[in-house]
Amino acid sequence: MSTSSPARGAEEFVAALRGLSYRYWGSHPFHVRMHAGELSEHELRVWAANRWYYQSVLPRKDAAIISNCPVPEVRRDWLDRIVYHDGTAEGDGDSGRERWLRLCEAVGLDRAEVLDERHIVPGVRFAVDAYVTFARTRPWVEAVASGLTEMFSGHLMQRRVGDMLANYSWIRREDLVYFTNRIDAVSEEGKSTLDIVVRYCVTREQQDQAIAALSFKCDVLWSLLDAIERAAMKE
Ligand SMILES: O=C(O)c1cc(C(=O)O)c2c(n1)C(=O)C(=O)c1cc(C(=O)O)[nH]c1-2
């Protein structure tokens, strides 16, 4: 990687980031089967219980970004993500955590078995922990860039709601409130994340590192679904 190449213009940089969409987990075979209505109830339970681990560590990943970031505006902006997932008070039904738990219950899991993480498989733990470690140890703007998968997720979640309602007769719209609520939040966050990355990645090398960070995150999500798919096959 040459540090002497000139920096990309903003448009070219954004196009390079967006160009990674083909590696996004939207095209993973497990998601394809989920959207087509081909997952069994057991497979949906394995998915919901394991993805809980991702949901539950997001605030720690975001806190790591804040702890490494010297820019007050970015820290202030980033704080909202922690509050979004954790809520503002214990037992707050209006939090990402609670909405995910609601989805878990809808697919037939009880809260206790989700919260005690008994269903989490090693590959999921490994992939998700790698995401948190990345945020703790890499420069803050790379960790921010790794969250840019959110640019691709709004459209996917929109489709997921429609496809799940059409293909799993026992799932109701209220059960999918995690996604319906998240769709707007994600497109807002995706835009502000992209603004931050474009603003603070000014050298060619920083831009390359941001692209590599997004690529790494695509691997995290893909590995997570690989592990879920494999775990769900047993039974
Ligand atoms: O359902 C999805 O496909 C999906 C994808 C992603 C993503 O692309 O990282 C996130 C979410 N959902 C999500 O709900 C969420 O809160 C979230 C936070 C982050 C992140 O990296 O900080 N990604 C995602």
Image: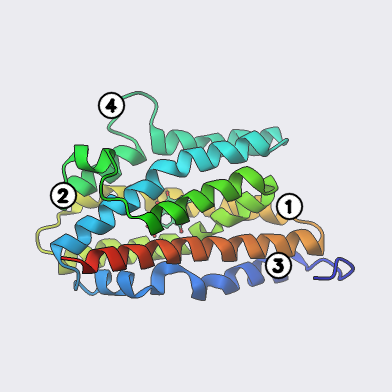
- Residue annotated with mark 3: 13
**Residue 227 shown left or right of residue 150 in the figure:** left
Relative to 154, does residue 96 appear above or below in the rendering?
A: above
Real-space CA distance between mark 3 and mark 4, rounded to the nearest whole angstrom: 42 Å
Residue at the left extreme of this rendering: 170
- Residue annotated with mark 1: 199
Q: Are marks 4 and 1 in contact (CB under 8 Å)?
A: no
- Residue annotated with mark 2: 106
Real-space CA distance between mark 2 and mark 3, rounded to the nearest whole angstrom: 41 Å
Front in this rendered view, residue 180 or 226? 226
Looking at the image, tell me whether mark 1 or mark 3 is earlier in sequence order.
3
Q: Secondary structure at mark 2?
A: helix
Q: Quadrant of ligand 1?
A: bottom left
Q: Secondary structure at mark 3?
A: helix
**Residue 28 shown left or right of residue 23 in the figure:** left
* Residue 193 x/y as whole percent: 59, 51
Disc 4 crowd rating (10 Å Cα; few below 14, some 14-19, many 20+) is few
